[in-house]
Amino acid sequence: MSNKEHKKMAHRLSQLLAGLLTISSLSANAQAQATTASINIYSARHYPTDEALYNDFSKSTGIKINRVDADDAGILSRLKAEGSASPADVILLVDAARLWRAEVDGLFLPIKSKKLEEAIPDKLRAKPTDTGGIAWFGLSTRARVIVYDKQKYQKTDIDTYEKLADSQFKGKLCIRSGSHPYNLSLFGAMTEHLGPQQTEVWLKGLVANLARSPAGGDTDQIKGVATGECAIAVTNTYYLARLMRSTNSVDKSMVEKIGVVFPNQASWGTHLNIAGGAVAKNSKNTENAVKFLEYLASASAQNHFANGNNEWPAAKGMSFDNPALKAMSGGGFKSEVLPISAVGMNQIKVQQMLDRVGFK
């Protein structure tokens, strides 16, 4: 082989090696990107059982989840403060009125997703924008029910929200702070049903019936009824279901002493509190954020909401095996149907009413 041919072959080998190195580098980069794909979630869901959801999503997609936990108000304040620099991709909130408020404040990115639109009913999601995008989707619900002392009352004694203000229950009501999002949404709905004037009279009646100053969470209200501190209380269903499914003897004893009512079955239905999700307005990982929301609307995730955290699934046609939810509802109940925007817009009025009637 001549010197010239030798140089030519060496050049070709050099080019081939360079090409192989380039392919290897590209492959390594692609693999690194795949293994470091991630989304940042701001979540108001503080439930240990949700860890299984996050782990399952990451395992099936390779997308890592970074999470910041706070309450609804704290998350919305943080998003506003961060502005366009926010690293948030997905927002998970546990109150419909707060979801609506964030939408109005422009904190969400309206998205188009066939999977989400087919799974989540119209009444449990935002209205489409002019471009057809939807700002947020409900992913689970909780009914706001009444529990009562079975030794003192029957279901018919307290089968509507209006009866909570009846004078026969003076000194017998336990309820958490009136300013808590769960109650603000309920009171906003009552304002829509009764009108502002009658709702304020009703709220004044609640204050008159308090067994103690509003304090604690919903579980504390249930315990108040079981221990005799009060005779009636208001709670979200998933708190009650936790106690019903508990193996703790104290919890079992409490559950045996109380009854549960899904209010207003003969009128507008029981109020639902909606937990939902959205893509953050300034998300840098929109495609993966949408994938995560679509995953939460899937059958496996919806079953987890029901069986893992005792919530009612939001997706259409879902069945579940949670014995506590089935036992307390008798297999089903009539739920309230109101525009979320109406409930949200009423909350300023409600807060003013609470101040006037002294509901802390």
Image: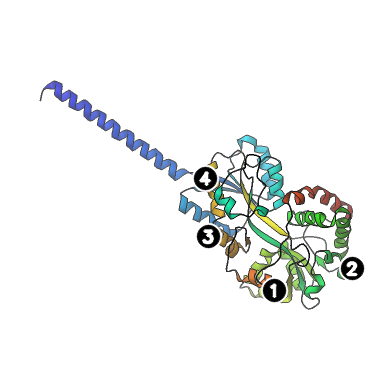
- Going from the N terminus, do you reach mark 3 or mark 2 first? 2
Location of mark 3 (residue): 300
Left or right placement of residue 347 versus residue 238 in this view? right
Location of mark 2 (residue): 167
* Whether residue 230 can be seen here: no
- The circle on residue 212 is none
Amino acid residing under circle 2: Ser
Q: Between label 2 and label 1, give the one nearer the viewer.
A: 2
Q: Between label 1 and label 4, give the one nearer the viewer.
A: 4
For mark 1, does the 10 Å Cα neighbourhood hold few (<14), some (14 to 19), or many (20 or more) residues?
A: many
- The location of residue 241, given as percent across then percent down, is 65, 68
Amino acid residing under circle 4: Asn
For mark 2, does the 10 Å Cα neighbourhood hold few (<14), some (14 to 19), or many (20 or more) residues?
A: few
Q: Residue at x 64, y 70 (%)?
A: 326
Location of mark 1 (residue): 255
* Residue ranking furthest to the bottom: 151
Residue 223: name its quadrant: bottom right
Q: Between label 1 and label 3, give the one nearer the viewer.
A: 3
Amino acid residing under circle 1: Val
Q: In 3D space, how far apart are the residues under numbered discs 3 and 2 (Cα atoms)? A: 46 Å
- The circle on residue 288 is 4
Q: Quadrant of the C terminus?
A: bottom right
- The location of residue 226, given as percent across then percent down, is 74, 73
- The location of residue 57, given as percent across then percent down, is 50, 53
- Going from the N terminus, do you reach mark 4 or mark 3 first? 4
Amino acid residing under circle 3: Ser
